[in-house]
Amino acid sequence: MIGNLNHIAIAVPDLDAAIHQYQVVFGAFVTSPQDLPDHGVRVAMVNLPNTKIELITPLGDNSPLQKFLQKNPLGGVHHLCYEVSDILKARDQLIAAGLEVAGDYDPKIGYHKHPVLFFHPKDCLGVLIELEEIPALKMKERVGIERIGPIHTISKTTAGSFQGVEGIGIGIEVDFKRKTPTDNKESED
Ligand code: CO
């Protein structure tokens, strides 16, 4: 059901310092900060070739990040975001599997102007999970692995030359045909 990892979010107490770290120290492309009042966060995105890091800091006193930063004053990994093609279908499927929505039951519009919603860490191996709906065509374009699989070949070698493998040689042939997005910099829409 889930597709690509869209981003990993790191909650930080000081967004400017976090941007400096990623832009200057790590040498990555970081977008200008943006306020998301609906979510109570201020965001800057780090665009990496294969995924994004979402740097988030509380916006307003009722931000859901306040408590997290009280527990993690230096900051910390806050959530993972997976892409889905149909967020309502994905939500209902996960609820049916016993997972609890964290926050709003109805999707909100997120940073990329796509619907998002969250699932509680208690049901997701201790990690808050965000789902983001990505239009189906875009999901297809982003599929990274064309074919992957072990191919078993019969070895011509006699059984005696193997120790306990009975003449079967296993050749692993992996064809990673990766399509890196040509422009991962603010090209979401
Ligand atoms: Co996020």
Image (cartoon, rainbow, N blue to C red):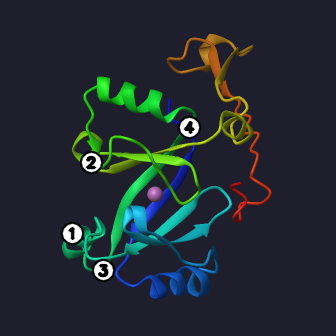
Query: What separation in Å lies between label 2 and label 4 (alpha carbons)?
Result: 19 Å
- Residue 121 circle label: 2
Query: Which residue is pictured at 20% across the width and 75% down the height?
Result: 70
Label 2 packing within 10 angstroms: few (<14), some (14-19), many (20+): some
Residue under numbered circle 4: 3
Query: What separation in Å lies between label 3 and label 4 (alpha carbons)?
Result: 31 Å
Q: What secondary structure is marked by label 2?
A: helix
Q: Earlier in the sequence, mark 4 or mark 1?
A: 4
The mark closer to the camera, 3 or 1, is 1
Q: Could you tell me the amino acid type at mark 4?
A: Gly
Q: Earlier in the sequence, mark 3 or mark 1?
A: 1
Q: Could you tell me the amino acid type at mark 2?
A: Pro
Query: What separation in Å lies between label 4 and label 1 (alpha carbons)?
Result: 30 Å
Query: Which residue is pictured at 70% across the width and 41% down the height?
Result: 138
Residue under numbered circle 1: 67
Q: What secondary structure is marked by label 3?
A: loop
Residue 121 coordinates in the image, percent (x, y): 27, 48
Query: What separation in Å lies between label 3 and label 1 (alpha carbons)?
Result: 13 Å
Residue under numbered circle 3: 74
Asked whether 135 or 10 is in front, the reply is 135
